[in-house]
Image: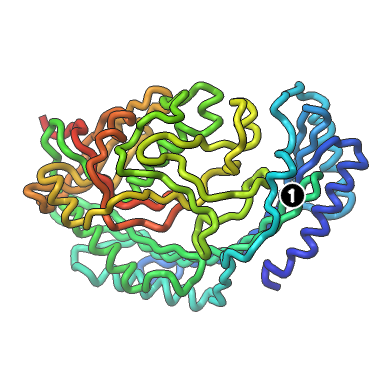
C-alpha cells in the first residue's frame, strides 16, 4: 500500500483524537500525525554494504486547558492507546503554569482550501535496483583519477511521508511527499596525504535526480582537486562562499529574526524591523507554494496557511519569522512559519560564477566550513575553513586549515555580489556569495 492511501484512515483518527480530547475536558486541542516509509541502500568499494527499510508512525497530541498546555505522543493508534495519551497530555497540563501566549492560532488563519503542490512522486525502485545505481555512481567516481584510492561509499535513498494536522477549530489538513537522493563520498591520496569530498543529488521526483555517473564523477573531481592543500596568507581578503555555505550564512540571518531568538533576546538583530541589514540590491523572499519543490507546504506546524512574503526587502528587514506562540510573545501576528521557512529565494542581480571569481580577483573561495564558531547574540563569526586560493580571478591552489572571521552584521553589509549557481537542494536556495573584507587567518 502506498503511503498516500493511508490518508483517509489517519484523517479519521485525527477526528477521533480531537473528540476524545473534548470528552476529557480540553478547551482546545491539536493533533499532528506523521507516517514515513523508506529504503536506503549503501555500497562501498564495489560491494553491497547495507540495506535499510524504515516505517515509522507517530501521533503528537497537545491539549489546552485555559492557558495551560500539555503534550504527549504515541505510535499506537488503538483506541485504548489514544485515550491514554490524551489523558497523559491532560495530566501534564495540570502541572504547567498559565501562559497567556498558549493556545491555537486564530481559526481564520487556516487555509481556505488545499491544492495539490505535486510533492508526491513515488519511486518504484527495489533494493537490487538501488544497489546497482549506487555501484554505478561509486565506480564512475573512482575512475576519475588513479589517486582516488578509497571510498566511503555511495547511497541511494527513497522516502515517502504523509502528514495530517487537525485542531479543535475544525481544520484538518493533509499532504504527502516524497524525497529521493543519491550520494557518493570518495577519498584521494597523494604524497602529501589524503583528502575526502562528496557530491549528492536530491529531489521530490526521481526523474529530477542528477545522473548517477555525473554524481560519482563530480564527487571524484571535487576530491582530487583538494589534494596537496596549502595554507592561505593571513590578512583581510574578499571571501566567496560556495552555495551550500552561502545558504548557511543566510540561515544565520533567518535565525536572528526568528521569534524564539527575538523574544528570548538572544539575537544580534533585536528590534531590527525596517533596518538595513543587506545591500539594497538583495531581497529574501519565501515562496512556499512552488510545485514539486523540496521546501513547499500549504500550512505550517500550527495549521496556519503559508503565503509568499519577503523577510528582507531591498536590504531592509520587512518581516520577522514567527509562529503563533512567538508572535504572541512579541505582540505581533504569526507569519505562518511554525516549523521553519519554506523555499527562501535570494532575489537580486546574479553574476556568472566565473565573473564573480574575476570580481574577487585575489581571495579565498570557501567550500567547507568546520566548527560552531557563530555567536547568535553578538553576531561574531569565526569558522575553520577549507577551499581554494584565488589569484587574478582564477583558482590557484587548494587550501586547508584556515580560519575566516568577522561579524555577521558587517558581513551582510559587505556582500559584493552573488552568482548564478543556485543550489536548490534545501529550504534556502542560495548561489555563491562574495563578501568583501573578511579576516583570513592562515600562515603567519
Q: Quadrant of the C terminus?
A: top left
On the image, the x and y values in percent for residue 413 come to 28, 33
Q: Is residue 359 left or right of residue 139?
A: left
What is the x, y in percent for residue 214?
31, 71
Q: Residue at x 18, y 43 (%)?
A: 364
| Occupied quadrant, residue 176 | bottom right
Q: Residue at x 33, y 45 (%)?
A: 246
Which corner quadrant holds the N terminus?
bottom right
| Residue under the point 46% across and 40% down | 311
- Coordinates of residue 150 in the picture (x, y in percent): 29, 62
Residue at screen point 74% across, 49% down: 59
Percent coordinates x, y for residue 419 in the rendering: 26, 53
The residue that disc 1 covers is 59
Q: Nearer the viewer, residue 324 or 204?
A: 324
Q: Nearer the viewer, residue 313 or 205?
A: 313
Above/below status of 367 relative to 117: above
- Asked if 252 appears above or below 366 in the picture, the reply is above
Figure disc tally: 1
Q: How is the image coloured?
A: rainbow
Q: Residue furthest right?
A: 23
Q: Secondary structure at mark 1?
A: strand
Using the rendered image of the protein, determine whether residue 389 is visible from the camera's viewpoint.
no
Q: In the image, is residue 231 above or below residue 185?
A: above
Q: Tag 1: Cα neighbours inside 10 Å, few (<14), some, or many (≥20)?
A: many
**Would residue 313 be visible to someone looking at this image?**
yes
Q: Is residue 356 left or right of residue 430?
A: left
The answer to which of 159 and 285 lies nearer the viewer is 285
Question: Above or below — where is 54 with respect to 168?
Answer: below
Amino acid at each position: 500500500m502506498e503511503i498516500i492511501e493511508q490518508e483517509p484512515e489517519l484523517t479519521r483518527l485525527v477526528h477521533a483524537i480531537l473528540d476524545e480530547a473534548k470528552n476529557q475536558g480540553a478547551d482546545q486541542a491539536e493533533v499532528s500525525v506523521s507516517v514515513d516509509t523508506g529504503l536506503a541502500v549503501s555500497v562501498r568499494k564495489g560491494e553491497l554494504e547495507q540495506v535499510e527499510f524504515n516505517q515509522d508512525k507517530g501521533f503528537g497530541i497537545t491539549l489546552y486547558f485555559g492557558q495551560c498546555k500539555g503534550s504527549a505522543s504515541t505510535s499506537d493508534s488503538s483506541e485504548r492507546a489514544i485515550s491514554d495519551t490524551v489523558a497523559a497530555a491532560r495530566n501534564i497540563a495540570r502541572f504547567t503554569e498559565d501562559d497567556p501566549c498558549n493556545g491555537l492560532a486564530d481559526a481564520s488563519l487556516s487555509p481556505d482550501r488545499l491544492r495539490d503542490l505535486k510533492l508526491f512522486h513515488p519511486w518504484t525502485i527495489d533494493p537490487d535496483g538501488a544497489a546497482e545505481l549506487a555501484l554505478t555512481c561509486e565506480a564512475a567516481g573512482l575512475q576519475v583519477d588513479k589517486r582516488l584510492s578509497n571510498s566511503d561509499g555511495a547511497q541511494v535513498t527513497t522516502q515517502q511521508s504523509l502528514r495530517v494536522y487537525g485542531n479543535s477549530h475544525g481544520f484538518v489538513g493533509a499532504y504527502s511527499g516524497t524525497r529521493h537522493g543519491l550520494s557518493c563520498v570518495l577519498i584521494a591520496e597523494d604524497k602529501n596525504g589524503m583528502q575526502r569530498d562528496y557530491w549528492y543529488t536530491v529531489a521530490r521526483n526521481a526523474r529530477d535526480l542528477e545522473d548517477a555517473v555525473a554524481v560519482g564523477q563530480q564527487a571524484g573531481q571535487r576530491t582530487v582537486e583538494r589534494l596537496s592543500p596549502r595554507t592561505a596568507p593571513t590578512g583581510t581578503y574578499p571571501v566567496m562562499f560556495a552555495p551550500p555555505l552561502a545558504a548557511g550564512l543566510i540561515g544565520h540571518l533567518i535565525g536572528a529574526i526568528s521569534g524564539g531568538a527575538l523574544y528570548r533576546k538572544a539575537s544580534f538583530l533585536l528590534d531590527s524591523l525596517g533596518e538595513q541589514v543587506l545591500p539594497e540590491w538583495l531581497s529574501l523572499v519565501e515562496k512556499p507554494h512552488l510545485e514539486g519543490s523540496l521546501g513547499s507546504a500549504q500550512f505550517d506546524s500550527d495549521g496556519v496557511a503559508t503565503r509568499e512574503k519577503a523577510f528582507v526587502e531591498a536590504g531592509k528587514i520587512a518581516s520577522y519569522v514567527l509562529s503563533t506562540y512567538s508572535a504572541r510573545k512579541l505582540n505581533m501576528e504569526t507569519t505562518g512559519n511554525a516549523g521553519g521557512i519554506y523555499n527562501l529565494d535570494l532575489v537580486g542581480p546574479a553574476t556568472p560564477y566565473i565573473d564573480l571569481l574575476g570580481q574577487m580577483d585575489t581571495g579565498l573561495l570557501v567550500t567547507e566550513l568546520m566548527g560552531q564558531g557563530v555567536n547568535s547574540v553578538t553576531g561574531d563569526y569565526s569558522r575553520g575553513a577549507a577551499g581554494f586560493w584565488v589569484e587574478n580571478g582564477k583558482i590557484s591552489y587548494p587550501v586547508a586549515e584556515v580560519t575566516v572571521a568577522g561579524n555577521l552584521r558587517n558581513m551582510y553589509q559587505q556582500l559584493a555580489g552573488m552568482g548564478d549557481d543556485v543550489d536548490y537542494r534545501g529550504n534556502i536556495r542560495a548561489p555563491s556569495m562574495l563578501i568583501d573584507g573578511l579576516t583570513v587567518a592562515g600562515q603567519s
